[in-house]
Image: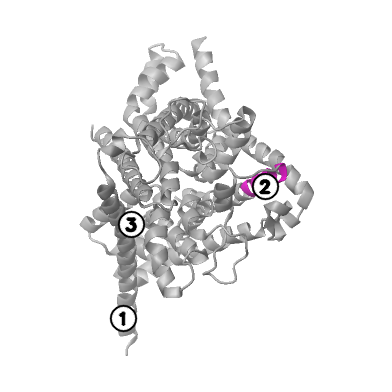
């Protein structure tokens, strides 16, 4: 009797996860139907976002999300791979421990603080170097890159560490240098894991709100250069959600949220189920 | 130059690049940590814990409202999220095991763990704030709980699976019903692991700002009314930091410092418990 109750309670809780996820999709979809019916495909292809005229085109925000994430990945990937190689192949054990603690420290810092640091300390430097406002796509890309770097480096290192020592030793026995071993043994062996980790970091970056809200500018305009202020989906949501005053405006914001959710769901699912699952099966 | 010399030079260059990237990464990270600590410690004072928010320019302004609000929001989220997360994890590990349903739930929950938190905020806005007609602490806490559940589900599932099957069989052989085996044997064996999961889950939502922006919203005054908008450290920090007033920005840094220390503390304690559990 109690056994059955216990089973049902735990099963209900587990099913609740599926239910909540489905519910999120349904609610966002329902809320955004008005915008989708009004604008159709124009919603994602036009970049005119004019609440006073009841015109909503999300292209600038979608472009901003994709571009800032792309920029962040471009900056973070080489450094993260460098750090991962350093940690798994070069560093002394003591340095590894020290670095591990630093990564934990950084993971503990809320993303809103990266944004504050970016606004007060990094944007002025960009302004001095490039002129203009300093706020914009480049600032967002850099802050985002710094924010995902610890996570990316840590998971890439873990992927590299799965390479069996015996493979590395065989390559060294053949007279390979450290770099030969890294590029011909470790990277080919851990390839799927490394790519999976990088995409997972991308999935996190694309939905990040607070780190970029400060430094992006919230201007609905497709940027002409990386120094132009622009916006992204999460930045638009964070800035405008509480200001929306018409049902079409709200509906458009929910449309943005749905777009973001689908984008990140696809990215994360590809990372987890295509690349990282391969790794698990390989072992 | 012989081929060997060439390989040695390339090797040195590659290793130098990777060491350099580690130095660059560390430099940025210490820059941010340094700013946080310097600015934060600078702005700390007893006033912060005594006074609530006030218009810019007043000496008697603090963060009491946001500190208490943060504790209430995270506490409430913990009360909702922890039991659900643990029970769901229990189902996966003890009943679902390798069934298709269990794997589907694990996969979906894993994806949820990295889903954009601002979308969760939008969802809660649509299902709670809109019908209620106003922002509330409940909405904020529920948004945080939704983010917390996958983290706790995952660690509970993993930790319960570490409990040896022979322990369960021994208990079954004595005639114990399944729920008793789970509660008295499995939970007891995985106690440290579950606790770590809970602490990490709390740490995960403690730093969240985005899902609170339009659920619990913000308030510059002290409140404990769960049906009203409630201030939190993160949203207060955000609002103060983008304000043009120096003293508000100062308070923003103080909030950033306090919150980071809190989350860092949770992370460290969580890991220590896990370590102590392993040593036994």
Mark 1 Cα shell of 10 Å, populated few (<14), some (14-19), many (≥20):
few
The dominant secondary structure in magenta is helix
Q: Give residue A58's position: percent from left, percent from top.
A: 66, 56
Q: Which residue is mark 1?
A: B9
Q: Give residue B127's position: percent from left, percent from top.
A: 62, 32
Q: How is the image coloured?
A: one colour
In depth, the one of B134 and A34 nearer the eye is B134
Q: In the image, which is nearer the foreground, mark 3 or mark 1? A: 3
Residue at (74% x, 43% y) in the render = A33
Q: Quadrant of residue B23?
A: bottom left
Please give the chain letter of the residue carrying mark 3: B
> Which contiguous range is marked in magenta?
A247-258
In depth, the one of B203 and B58 nearer the eye is B58
Q: Classify B33 as above or below A244.
A: below
Q: Quadrant of residue A166?
A: bottom left
Which badge, 3 or 1, is on the more N-terminal residue? 1
Q: Which mark is residue B32?
A: 3
Q: Classify A9 as above or below A68.
A: above
Q: Secondary structure at mark 3?
A: helix
Q: Decide whether residue A195 is among the magenta residues.
A: no
Total marks in image = 3
Residue at (57% x, 29% y) in the render = A16
Mark 3 Cα shell of 10 Å, populated few (<14), some (14-19), many (≥20):
many
Question: In the shown orientation, is residue A177 left or right of residue B105?
Answer: left
Q: Decide whether residue A253 is among the magenta residues.
A: yes
Q: Which residue is mark 2?
A: A255
In depth, the one of B78 and A266 nearer the eye is B78
Question: Disc 1 vs disc 2: Cβ atoms closer than 8 Å?
Answer: no
Residue at (49% x, 30% y) in the render = B137
Q: Secondary structure at mark 1?
A: helix
């Amino acid at each position: 009797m109690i056994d059955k109750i216990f089973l049902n309670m735990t099963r209900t809780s587990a099913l609740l996860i599926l239910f909540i996820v489905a519910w999120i999709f349904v609610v966002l979809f329902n809320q955004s139907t008005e915008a989708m019916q009004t604008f159709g495909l124009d919603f994602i292809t036009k970049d005119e976002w004019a609440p006073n005229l009841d015109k909503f085109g999300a292209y600038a925000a979608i472009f901003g999300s994709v571009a800032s994430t792309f920029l962040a990945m471009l900056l973070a990937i080489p450094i993260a791979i460098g750090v991962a190689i350093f940690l798994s192949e070069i560093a002394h054990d003591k340095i590894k421990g020290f670095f591990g603690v630093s990564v934990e420290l950084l993971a503990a810092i809320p993303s809103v603080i990266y944004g504050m640091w970016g606004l007060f300390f990094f944007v002025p430097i960009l302004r001095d170097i490039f002129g203009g406002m300093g706020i914009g796509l480049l600032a967002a890309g850099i802050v985002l890159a710094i924010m995902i770097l610890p996570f990316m480096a840590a998971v890439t290192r873990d992927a590299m560490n799965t390479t069996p020592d015996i493979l590395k030793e065989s390559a060294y026995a053949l007279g390979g240098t450290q770099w030969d071993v890294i590029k011909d043994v470790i990277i080919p062996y851990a390839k799927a894991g490394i790519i999976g980790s990088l995409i997972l970091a991308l999935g996190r970056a694309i939905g990040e709100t607070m780190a970029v809200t400060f430094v992006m500018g919230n201007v609905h305009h497709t940027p002409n250069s990386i120094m132009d202020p622009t916006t992204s989906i999460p930045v638009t949501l964070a800035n405008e959600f509480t200001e929306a005053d018409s049902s079409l405006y709200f509906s458009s914001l929910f449309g943005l949220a749905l777009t973001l959710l689908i984008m990140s769901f696809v990215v994360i699912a590809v990372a987890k189920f295509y690349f990282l699952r391969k790794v698990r099966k390989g072992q | 130059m012989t081929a060997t010399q060439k390989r040695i030079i390339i090797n040195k260059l590659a290793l130098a690049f990777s060491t350099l990237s580690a130095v660059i990464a560390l430099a940025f990270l210490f820059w941010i940590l340094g700013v946080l600590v310097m600015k934060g410690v600078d702005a700390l004072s007893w006033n912060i814990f005594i006074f609530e928010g006030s218009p810019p320019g007043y000496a008697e302004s603090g963060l009491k409202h946001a500190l208490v609000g943060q504790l209430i929001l995270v506490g409430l989220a913990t009360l909702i999220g922890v039991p659900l997360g643990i029970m769901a994890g229990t189902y996966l590990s003890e009943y679902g095991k390798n069934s298709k349903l269990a794997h589907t739930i694990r996969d979906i929950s894993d994806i949820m763990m990295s889903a954009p938190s601002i979308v969760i905020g939008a969802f809660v806005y649509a299902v709670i704030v809109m019908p209620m007609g106003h922002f509330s602490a409940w909405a904020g806490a529920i948004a945080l709980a939704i983010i917390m559940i996958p983290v706790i589900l995952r660690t509970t599932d993993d930790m319960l699976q570490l409990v040896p099957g022979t322990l369960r069989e021994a208990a079954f052989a004595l005639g114990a019903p399944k729920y008793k085996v789970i509660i008295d044997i499995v939970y007891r064996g995985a106690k440290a692991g579950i606790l770590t999961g809970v602490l990490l889950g709390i740490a995960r939502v403690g730093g969240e700002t985005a899902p609170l922006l339009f659920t619990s919203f913000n308030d510059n005054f002290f409140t404990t009314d769960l049906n009203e908008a409630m201030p939190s450290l993160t949203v207060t920090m955000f609002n103060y930091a983008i304000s043009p007033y120096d003293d508000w920005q100062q308070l923003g840094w103080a909030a950033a410092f306090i919150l980071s220390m809190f989350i860092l503390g949770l992370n460290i304690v969580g890991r220590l418990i896990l370590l102590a559990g392993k040593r036994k």
